[in-house]
Image (tube, rainbow, N blue to C red):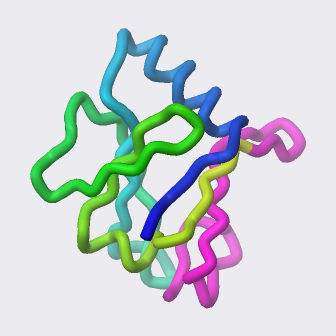
Amino acid sequence: MSVSVTPKAARQIRKALDQRGGGYGLRVAVKTSGCSGYAYALEFAEAPSPEDLSFESEGVQLLVDAKSLPMVDGTQLDWVREGLNEGFKFNNPNATASCGCGESFAV
């Protein structure tokens, strides 16, 4: 079981950590939300919590709680630019559907 990032996403995570003055890594979680059932939640972490599983990818630490891991196992986080917008994109092999706005997913 794991979660990974592309080189572009890793650069953005390192850049954000540097701008905020440091940190341990990025916490990836799933919360109940949206029209498809679940939404991704990202936050920078100062340290791992006892319930976190830690994964290293492209030189950055990714933290995932045990409840979220089955829904994001195998997910690759990418950084994409679409027109004037840019941000993280989740390539989740477990997602069976997503809403039209792309904010939520189903497993």
Q: Position of residue 27 (x, y in %)?
A: 35, 47
Please provide the residue range marked out in magenta.
80-107
Residue drawn at (70%, 76%) of the image: 100
Q: 84 left or right of 31?
A: right
Question: For the view shown, which residue lies furthest in the left direction?
Answer: 50
Figure check: 89 above or below 86: below
Name the foreground residue: 51 vs 57.
57
Q: Position of residue 19 (x, y in %)?
A: 47, 12
Residue drawn at (68%, 45%) of the image: 6
Name the foreground residue: 22 vs 103.
22
> Which quadrant is the N terminus positioned in?
bottom left
Q: 67 left or right of 80?
A: left
Figure check: 43 above or below 50: above
Figure check: 32 above or below 29: below
Q: Position of residue 85 (x, y in %)?
A: 77, 40
Residue drawn at (10%, 51%) of the image: 50
Tell me which corner region of the image, top left, top right, bottom left or bottom right, holds residue 44.
top left
Q: Position of residue 89 (x, y in %)?
A: 66, 55
Name the foreground residue: 18 vs 83.
18
